[in-house]
Image: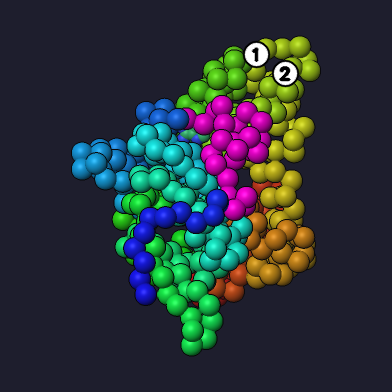
Amino acid sequence: MAIHSTKKLAKPPSRTISSESLDQTLENNDTTLRPKSLEDYIGQQEIKKNLAVFMQASKNRSEPLEHVLLHGSPGLGKTTLANIIANEMKTNIRITSGPIMERQGDIAALITNLEPGDILFIDEIHRLKPIIEETLYSVMEDFALDIILGKGPSAKSIRLNLPKFTLIGATTKLSLISSPLRDRFGHTFRLDFYQQNEMEKIIERSAKLLEISIEKEAVKKLAYSSRQTPRIANRLLRRMRDFASVEGLNHLNLSLIEKGLTHLGIDEQGLDGTDRTILRLIIENFRGGPVGLSTLSAATHEEGQTLEDIYEPFLLQKGFLERTPRGRMVTQKGYHHLGLIPPPQDKTQSLLF
Ligand code: ADE
């Protein structure tokens, strides 16, 4: 029996959060620094240009934007972009995340409470349980929710029609999104690491919002130490403001930034203590590598996921680490950065890869 209805189920489970309550749970001040419009969003030029066109076209047709998949490393602004889309489309946004939804009922209660045109933001969408992912297929494609009632021969399937809405999924791991799910997104955008000049603009903008003056050389230094990631830049800026405040200063200069970064264990290349521990461990315990991720995870007491998502991309991009088919290896540059002498290069090994 198919029931066509837009009737709502129970209220969304408490494990889902509105954007305002999520904002309150985020680190203090983070939301004040987040841009609210595409115009204020620095960097990711291609995404901004495309999004502006697609949002305008949707508005012209009075239709919601097609589903959007955002992927990229943590801290690059996926959640910020989702909130900007909601602002620009003048719609509500409901925020949830893949791992907190356990049963079909969790997603059902959430989507049946959406208003037409609303945005549902699912963070870490690669961590959805299979039952929930499968439920999403018809939801995304037909705006219909198929629910099985009962078990065995007397089980019945009912179909609820839903209002048209936009699903925005965010992931740090595009490769873990199955193709049936990926194919149901009308737009897929990859957020890149930010350029030095973009990081400088972000820091200058944030300093203005935090009402603290910062000299150009200090901006450059902070930008260089922020792993090309706005979330890190904003966090470091707030810590520098703390250092300045206890010294009774309302101005950030280069010497204060240098002292502050040293206190936080961040070196001149922007590596923190964990980055250096990882390199040192590979060198000391595994003769520079190759070493597999799980071994490295056990040795460093960091989760494999954290190593892969947070530390590895930065070390690879800095040229201190390389990935070979047999595992991670510290490069000559990595040895030099730690003040160590690299072993002579094995020509046969480098020919192999
Ligand atoms: N704060 C965090 N990300 C930002 C961005 N891309 N532009 C401006 N401010 C930001």
Counting from the top left corner in percent of width and height, residue 292 is at 65, 70
- Judging depth in this view, the residue of 313 and 212 nearest the camera is 212
Q: Amino acid at mark 2?
A: Ala
Q: Residue at x 66, y 27 (%)?
A: 238
Residue that label 1 marks: 251
Query: Which picture quadrant has residue 60?
Result: top left
Q: Is residue 68 left or right of residue 256?
A: left
Compared to residue 231, the image places residue 166 above or below, namely: below
Q: Amino acid at mark 1?
A: His
Query: Which picture quadrant has residue 208?
Result: top right
Q: Which of the labelled discs sits on residue 244, or is there none?
A: 2
Q: Is residue 199 magenta?
A: no
- Residue range corresponding to the magenta coloring: 13-35
Counting from the top left corner in percent of width and height, residue 250 is at 67, 12
Q: Residue at x 56, y 60 (%)?
A: 106
Asked if the residue under mark 2 is in contact with the one under mark 1, i.e. CB atoms within 8 Å, the reply is yes
Q: How many other residues sit within 10 Å of disc 1, few (<14), some (14-19) or many (≥20)? A: some
Counting from the top left corner in percent of width and height, residue 332 is at 62, 56
Mark 1–mark 2 Cα distance, whole angstroms, equals 7 Å
Q: Residue at x 50, y 29 (%)?
A: 202
Q: Is residue 19 magenta?
A: yes
Query: Which picture quadrant has residue 211?
Result: top right
- Judging depth in this view, the residue of 285 and 82 nearest the camera is 82
Counting from the top left corner in percent of width and height, residue 331 is at 61, 58
Q: Which secondary structure, mark 1?
A: strand
Q: How many other residues sit within 10 Å of disc 2, few (<14), some (14-19) or many (≥20)? A: some
Compared to residue 347, the image places residue 308 above or below, namely: above
